[in-house]
Each structure stands twice: as structure tokens, then as C-alpha cells.
Amino acid sequence: MAIIDIRIELKKGVADPEGANTKKTLEALGFEGIEDLKSVKVYEVTLDMTAEEARQAGEEMCRKLLVNPVIQRYSVTVR
Amino acid sequence: MAIIDIRIELKKGVADPEGANTKKTLEALGFEGIEDLKSVKVYEVTLDMTAEEARQAGEEMCRKLLVNPVIQRYSVTVR
């Protein structure tokens, strides 16, 4: 059994309104020193296979369903 | 300068329709061996401070804004 994290981020230059608004709100609450804030989506998947098989399955899930390669990039890590 | 990951997950027992539907769709596409799939929210925050200060600021952001402690739990890690 293996647990993988599929981490999906917006590519550089793609607008991230959720991140921008979260940053603005934190600043309005008094938080200082925030240089950047990105919103990221993670799917934590538990798979009944070896770690290496799980990593490969995760990559395939990204290509077939989870990721829009025009605006998103992804990484798959075994936890 | 420090980069932190604020990882926000649903607590055990809280319904995760996004995760459930993603799992169902992956299975419909032929993926086998998926035992569990959780949707997780991550904020990647770049802060102009030391790693330890950034970790503490991240915890405070969770308590003050980002996390609903009734249904969510969080962890802050320095990247």
C-alpha cells in the first residue's frame, strides 16, 4: 500500500484570484511580510500497490483527468 | 525569506464530495486499486522572515482566517 500526494499548481503567469484575495485578506488582518501566496490543490491518494507503481499511476491520473496542462503543472510524490 | 506550505484537510468523518467524485471518475476511467482519495487545500506562502517566524505566522493565519476548526485540520511545514 502506498500513499501519494498529487500536487497541482497554476503555471507561472496564470492568474490566481483565490491566492491574491487570501493574501489581501491576511494583510488586512495585520499579517506583514507576505511576498507571495499561491493556492495549490492536492489529492492524497491511497493505492493498493507498490510505491513506484503508485507514483506512475498518479502521473497517469494527472494526464488523463486531473490536470489541465494549458494552465496547470503537477508533481507526484510518495508520502 | 522562507516558503511555507499550509496544508488544510477535512477532519475524519467529514464528507468529502470532491474526493469521492474524483475517485469515482478515476475508477470509471479504468484506474484500479484506489483505496482512498482525499481532496486537500494547500497555500504556499513566501514570507520575508526566518523559517521559524514563518512557521509561527502560518499557524496564526490558520487560526485567524484559513481554517474552520469544526471540520478542518491543518499543518504548517517549511519547504
Image (cartoon, coloured by chain):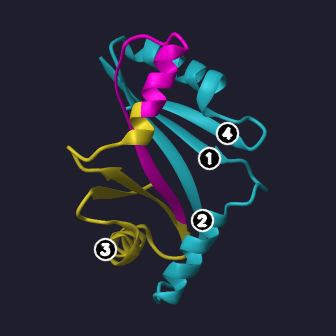
Chain colours: A cyan, B yellow
Callout 2: chain:
A
Mark 4–mark 3 contact, CB under 8 Å?
no
Query: Gap in Å between the C-alphas at discs 1 and 2?
Result: 11 Å
Find residue A34 and report its horizontal and vertical position in percent: 56, 76
Determine if marks 4 and 3 fall on one subunit: no
Q: CA distance from mark 1 to mark 4?
A: 5 Å
Which SS class for mark 2?
A: helix
Dot 1 or dot 4, earlier in sequence: 1
Q: Which residue is mark 4?
A: A73
Q: Chain of mark 4?
A: A
Q: Are marks 1 and 4 on the same chain?
A: yes
Quickly name the residue at label 2.
A19
Q: Kindly indicate whether the residue at mark 4 contacts the one at mark 1 (C-beta within 8 angstroms).
A: yes
Can you tell which quarter of the image residue A5 is in? Answer: top left
> Which residue sits at x=48%, y=42%?
A42
Total marks placed:
4
Part of the protein shown in magenta: B21-45
**Mark 4 or 2 closer to N-term?**
2
Left or right, residue A20 beside residue B29:
right
Relative height, residue A23 to residue B3 (above, below)? below
Which residue matches tag 3? B63
Q: Helix, strand or loop at disc 4?
A: strand
Instruction: Answer yes or no: are tags 2 and 3 on the same subunit.
Output: no
